[in-house]
Image (cartoon, grey):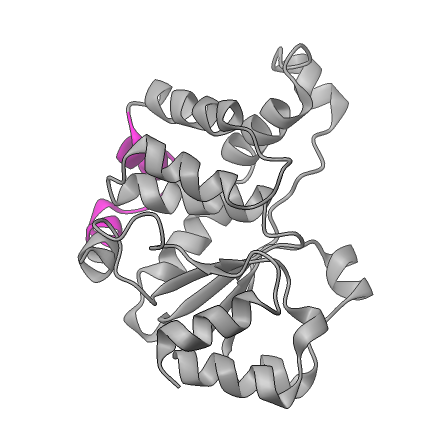
């Protein structure tokens, strides 16, 4: 089965499973990064083989330890890939929001702000993973494949110079709960940092690492 056929098949089984290139073909190679909800419920031998046939080498799991405790990969599945657990912290302690003057923001803007500024070590690890050729193709997922996965996908696409309307289109394809204004808030915060490269450097990523990632992912 061809990769495009496999992708359609998996989209029919796993919520929010899609190629990050679907709305950004001019900016990222097809079949290198997939975004998804958690595929935990779909660990059948058939899906395992489909992932292998799709060329999946790595899984980046953004969920918390609690989420993983409730719903984890079986050994056969996780041992078939390079499995990376990168917990994106979304706790948003009220004292932090109050101290930083973010209590007047909408809940989702608080979520975006906290993810960007209190998960810089996690962002650094994700991008370091994605800079390594042996990790492709990669699936990135959280629970629903919407919020943590959406912000991570946005940062990747910004690095690849994808247009903001394309990034919003990818985000809105997730479900009815996504709003373009929330993605626009991320664009504004990144711009305040001086652009995506400066934001990622503020996460202690090396420019040569980011350049290597761009060279691997751009068509």
Q: Which quadrant would the C terminus be assigned to in this image?
A: bottom left
Residue 136 in magenta stretch: no
- Look at the image and tell me whether residue 57 can be seen: no
Q: Which quadrant would the N terminus be assigned to in this image?
A: bottom left
**192 and 42: which is toward the camera:** 42
- Name the residue: 82% across, 64% down: 70
- Residue 205, position as x, y percentages in the image: 33, 46
- Name the residue: 55% across, 26% down: 113
- When the figure is inspected, residue 200 is found, relative to residue 24, above or below; the finding is above
- Look at the image and tell me whether residue 31 can be seen: yes
**144 and 120: which is toward the camera:** 144
Residue 204 in magenta stretch: yes
- Residue 141, position as x, y percentages in the image: 56, 58
- When the figure is inspected, residue 189 is found, relative to residue 204, above or below; the finding is above
Q: What stretch is highlighted in magenta?
A: 195-211
- When the figure is inspected, residue 162 is found, relative to residue 133, above or below; the finding is above
**101 and 204: which is toward the camera:** 101
- Left or right: where does residue 91 sit relative to residue 130? right
């Amino acid at each position: 089965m061809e990769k495009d056929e496999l992708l359609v098949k998996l989209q029919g089984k796993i919520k929010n499973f899609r190629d990050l290139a679907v709305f950004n073909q001019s900016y990222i190679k097809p079949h290198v990064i997939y975004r998804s909800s958690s595929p935990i419920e779909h660990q059948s031998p058939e899906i395992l083989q489909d992932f292998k046939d799709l060329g999946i080498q790595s899984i980046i799991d953004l969920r918390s330890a609690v989420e993983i405790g409730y719903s984890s990969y079986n050994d056969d599945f996780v041992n078939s890939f390079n499995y990376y657990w990168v917990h994106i912290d979304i706790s948003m302690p009220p004292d932090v929001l109050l101290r930083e003057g973010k209590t007047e923001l909408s809940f989702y803007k608080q979520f975006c702000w906290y993810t960007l500024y209190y998960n810089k070590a996690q962002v650094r690890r994700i991008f370091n993973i994605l800079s390594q050729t042996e990790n492709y193709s990669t699936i990135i997922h959280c629970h629903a494949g919407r919020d943590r996965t959406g912000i991570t996908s946005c940062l990747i696409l910004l690095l690849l110079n994808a247009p903001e309307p394309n990034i919003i289109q990818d985000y809105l394809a997730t479900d009815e709960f996504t709003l373009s204004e929330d993605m626009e808030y991320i664009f504004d915060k990144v711009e305040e940092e001086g652009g995506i490269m400066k934001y990622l450097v503020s996460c202690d990523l090396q420019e040569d690492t980011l350049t290597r990632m761009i060279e691997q992912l751009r068509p």
